[in-house]
Structure formats: structure tokens, C-alpha cells
Image (cartoon, helix red, strand yellow):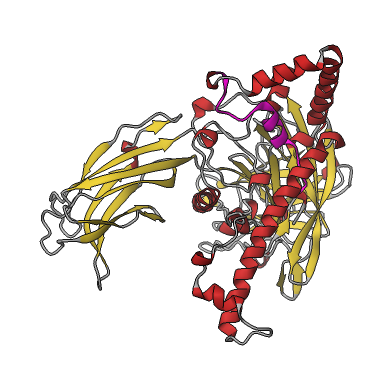
Amino acid sequence: MHYVFVRVVKARYLPTNGNPIVGIAVSASRIESKPARKTAFFEWDQTFAFGRDAPDSSSILEISVWDSPPGGGSEDAAAAARGKFLGGICFDVTEIPLRDPPDSPLAPQWYRLEGGGAHSGDLMLATWVGTQADESFPDAWKTDTAGNTNSRAKVYLSPKLWYLRATVLEAQDVLHSTAPLKEASLYLRAQLGFQVHKTKSVLTRNGTPSWNEDLLFVAAEPFADHLVFTLEARQQHKGPSPIAVLRIPLTAIERRVDDRQVATRWFNFEDPNSEKARYKGRVQLRLCFDGGYHVMDEAAHVCSDYRPTARQLWKPPIGTVELGIIGCRNLLPMKAIDGKGCTDAYCVAKYGPKWIRTRTVSDSLDPRWNEQYTWRVFDPSTVLTMGIFDSSGASESEGEKSATRPDLRMASLETGKVYRNSYPLIVLTNNGVKKMGEIEVAVRFIRSAPTLDFLHVYTQPLLPLMHHVKPLGVVQQEVLRSTAVKIIAVHLSRSEPPMRREVVLHMLDADTHAKAALPHFDPKLSLAEAVDREELDEEFDGMPSGRSPETVRARYDKLRAVGARVQTVLGDLAAQGERVQALVTWRDPRATGIFVGLCFVVAMILYLVPTKMVAMASGFYCFRHPIFRDRMPSPALNFFRRLPSLSDRLM
């Protein structure tokens, strides 16, 4: 997309003592500069960019200088029109030179102002035709952004997240100085920012409680916070009361990249009600940052990165993906201004820790961006996610409602081939499915790794070693993911221009897949001794129900939760079947090619080798000694888990 750039530098010999304003008009667009700074010259040093749909279209570029009263400083167009006309210049747009980087910038020149009298003065400016690749484009005042300071394109980076593991072992001397607490139920409350975890309550008489519990937090670099431990006592007929407190800076905690044992340390408690450091007992802790885990911040089926936190465990990239965001068509109005529906649209794309945001195109239902971005690819079984949002902060998915987004899976892209397609933007509302428009993008994957190394990735597990050596529970991992999403949202909201919390939550799919955090349905039948009175009352309730509306509503909500669990299990089973089907459907051309090649090799082995030898070799392999076994999943299982399912196509 071509733009007409105009750089207004300064003016001299203007017959005014005020703060003149420069007006620029081309086609149907008109822009006024800020008031000039009065030095030895009248200085502006501003760059303007006018969109140009047809490079060969004929139009006139008009640049005029208007007087403004001293101290006025108004940037309003009407105020500029009321000033005195000091002179102007006209250019034929077809005669303006075309500049393509890496050409050097055009040097500004002095032009004589005409039409303002005998001594109109001179204006220094430069004008050229360029594209978004021009180095002046990011800071230029663009006609399609209406001068919004937060409308420029921006690249964001997610903070580096770590899992902080705090193992609480035991405490000593916690009751020696507190006479009333002869016997108390003690627990330890750990807090890191907004994250709060508590250990189980332990009854103690000698002031030496023991817990031996693991508490897991999510911490973001740079480590400026403190991990705060508060020892609290819970007595009968009384609420919890703090006994001692401990503050540990995160910078004092060591890091590990494997499952080695971390040395325990004793920390002294302090009095929470006194500013002086008084000994209130001590606690034994084992603290470390687990760099061998990948901190999940996305839904599992649309994850864009599986690398561990520790950089020394990263493998080299296998290629790069290039994304060209062309534009949108037929967007629906998101708000009304002066009775007219409009949309100030911008696009957000995320892959790995890198986020990009295009510039905001104001008041357009068919915005055009023509911006290009690149990412490094470390795993083919990853997904690039995009979304369209309105600059008012409400996304096209109406904030909290579920919506489908264009998700581009790297494994489905052939090496070196350019895919240019339009993807529908669909939102699921209370009234059903609603199409919000279309987005047109071009994408290309370029492989940089050797062929054998690239195919070898398909036999490797998706998640790092620590997820298999010391796995996290489903519910625990979803809670940690929700925490990571909140940390990322806070971090990106502090950028300039800020990325709104609603945008981050929508891109990370935090609310859409909240039901995935529910534990899987328990296949064991309920025992009679484990059934509580509420369940028995529900079992013997007649039809229709004779209970109160509140009770019926609570039972209905419980039934919905059970139904969500069953739906989750059925969805997982369907995903496994879709992966089996993907072996022969060529949805992932490389995976299907590997499968066909392996089938040919197995057929040749079964044809050439006697069946008894194959059975004996299989038996020796299955019953091999543990020293020949690997803690990681088998290559066949890794290959199967990497096969694409249809989960990313569902709403």
C-alpha cells in the first residue's frame, strides 16, 4: 500500500509574529499541523502520511501556511481557517518521486510560498511516495488513524514466567513466646502478589508443626516482589490470628532446570505487629524456580509455544513464519458516533511470547493494513492466533462472549508456499452464530532446519521433560494458567500504547475454555456410605420436584457441571479418533508422509523376516530392563500426540 509522505521541517521570512499552522490537503483528506515553535525559524518537524489507493491516480497536493494569533496555539481546523493566509505550494502527485528502502531519505528543500503577498516567505519540506516499510511511517501522522496517539503499530513481548515451587516442611519454636496458645491449629499462608496459598491446618502442643506440602506460584521477571509467609493460628470460637511473618525476596531464590533436589533452608520468623526484628520461631523451606517446565498461558489445543522457561534447554528453531495482514471486509459497526455506526479496527496476532498489533484504522468497515511480521518457529505443532478488535476496548467478540478466531497451524503449511486466504470472523451470541466480517491474510512458512532434523521433531514430546518426570495435575495446571494469563494481562496493560485486558483474555482464550479446568468425570460408582443427605434427598424427590426454587436451581447447576465433565471426556475421545483419521487425510502432509513411509518399512520387515523372529524381538523390547528405558514418552506416542485434531475448528 502506497502513501504520500510530507515532511514539514521549518519556515523563514514569514510576515507574522504568531505561531503559524501548516495545512496539507490531497484528494479528500486534509490535515493541520501543530503550531510552530518560534526559534530563529518557525519549526514544526512533522511527517504526514496520506493513503493512496491507486499509485497512478492523478491528484494535487496542496500545502498552505496560515497565521495564528500569538498564544493561540489552536490545532483546530476552524481556528486555522480564521487565520491569515500566508502562502502555499502545489504539487502534482504523479510527479512526486517514489522511494523504496534501503534508499536514503529525501533531503528537505526550501520552497517559495506563493499567493500570500509580496513577501510570503520560504517553507522547507520534503515529499515522496513510499510504503509501510519507510522508516518515517511509524511516527508519521496518518490520515486513516485520525491522529490517535495510541493507533500506531506495536510489537509486544510477554514477560518471562517461572514456576516458583515452595515446599513447606516444618516449623520450630513458634509457640514458645505465646502463653495463651497452649494448643492451637497452625497453618502457613504464602502470598506472592495476588496469589495466595495455604497449607493444611496442623494441631500442635509443642510448637513444632509439620506440613511437608508443595505450593506452586507463577512469577514474572524481573523479580521485584517478595514471597510472604504468614503463620496463623485457628482456635475454637475464634478467627485466624497471625503469629509470625517471613518475607523472602525472589532474587534470593535459586533456579533449577531439572528434577535435582534443592537444599532446604531455615528462615527466622518475625513479629508481624512490631517493627523491630524479634525472633518468633523459624521455618524450614525448600525454594526454587523450576525452569524445566513450560508455563502454560494458552489453551492446550491452540498453544503457540512449548519451550521450557530456562533458555539453556531451548532447541534451535526449525524455521520462520511470515504473516502478512492485508485487511478486513464487511465488518459490522461496533459503536455509534453522531447516530452513525463505525468501527476503529485493529488486528492483534500472537505466536509464542511475541504479540503484534497493527495500527488502528479509524471509521472504516473495510480497513486495510498491509503489514508484515515474522516469528521464529520451534515446533510445527503450534498455532498462530489472530483477532480483530475495536479501539474503544470492546472486541468484535463483544468482550466476554466466545468467538472463533483465525488460528493458523504451522504443521498444515507447506515449506515455501504462500497461502493467501480470507477467514470469517464469527461470534457466538445468545441468538446464535453471527458473522462479524472477514480478515484477509497471507502466510508463508520457511524451513531452516535440515530435513532429518525437522522430521525428528515429530518423534519428540510436546512438553519438556519436567512435565513427564514430575507432572502437574489437570486442575492445578489450569489454575496456574489462569494466574499466568492475569500476569500477562497486567504486564501488557503497562505498555505504551497499552493492550487492554479484554484483548489479552480473548487472545489467550482464558474465558472460553474455563470449563476445561473441571476435573474429569470419576468412573467409580458412588458408595452408599459416601452419599450425603443432599444427594439422598435429590434421589427420592418426586416428579415434579417438591423442593424450593433455590434448591432446584442448585441441583440444576450441579447437573450442568456434571454434563460439562462428560462433554469434556467425550471431546477428548473424539480428538483421539480425529488424530487417528489424520494419519491418512494429509491434513499434516509431513506426518502423513512419515506414517506412509513407516507402513512401507513395516510391510517390508514382515515380508522378509519370519513371524517368530518379529514376535521374539517385540517381546524382548517390551520386557527390556529399566536401564534401557527412557523417562520420556515413546516416539510413537509423541508422534500420535502431534497429529492435528478438529478441536481448533470448533467454537
Name the spot of residue 168 as percent of width and height, x first.
32, 45
Does 45 lie within the magenta span?
Answer: no
Answer whether residue 581 is visible to the viewer in this image.
Answer: yes
Residue at image x 45%, y 41%? 163
105 sits left or right of 211 in the view: right
Relative depth, front residue between 442 and 162: 162
636 sits left or right of 492 in the view: right
Name the spot of residue 606 as percent of width and height, x first.
83, 18
Relative depth, front residue between 592 and 138: 592
Name the spot of residue 630 as percent of width and height, x first.
57, 24
The number of numbered badges drawn on the structure is 0
Residue at image x 55%, y 73%? 535
Answer whether residue 90 is visible to the viewer in this image.
Answer: no
Q: Check the picture and name the quadrant holding the C terminus.
A: bottom right
Relative depth, front residue between 281 and 492: 281
Q: Quadrant of residue 563?
A: bottom right
Residue at image x 33%, y 47%? 227
Q: Quadrant of residue 433?
A: bottom right
Relative depth, front residue between 13 and 125: 125
Does 636 lie within the magenta span?
Answer: yes
Q: Is residue 303 above or below residue 115?
A: above
Q: Check the picture and name the quadrant holding the N terminus.
A: top right
Region in magenta = 628-646
Residue at image x 34%, y 55%? 200
Name the spot of residue 500 as percent of width and height, x first.
57, 57
Q: Is residue 56 above or below residue 147?
A: above
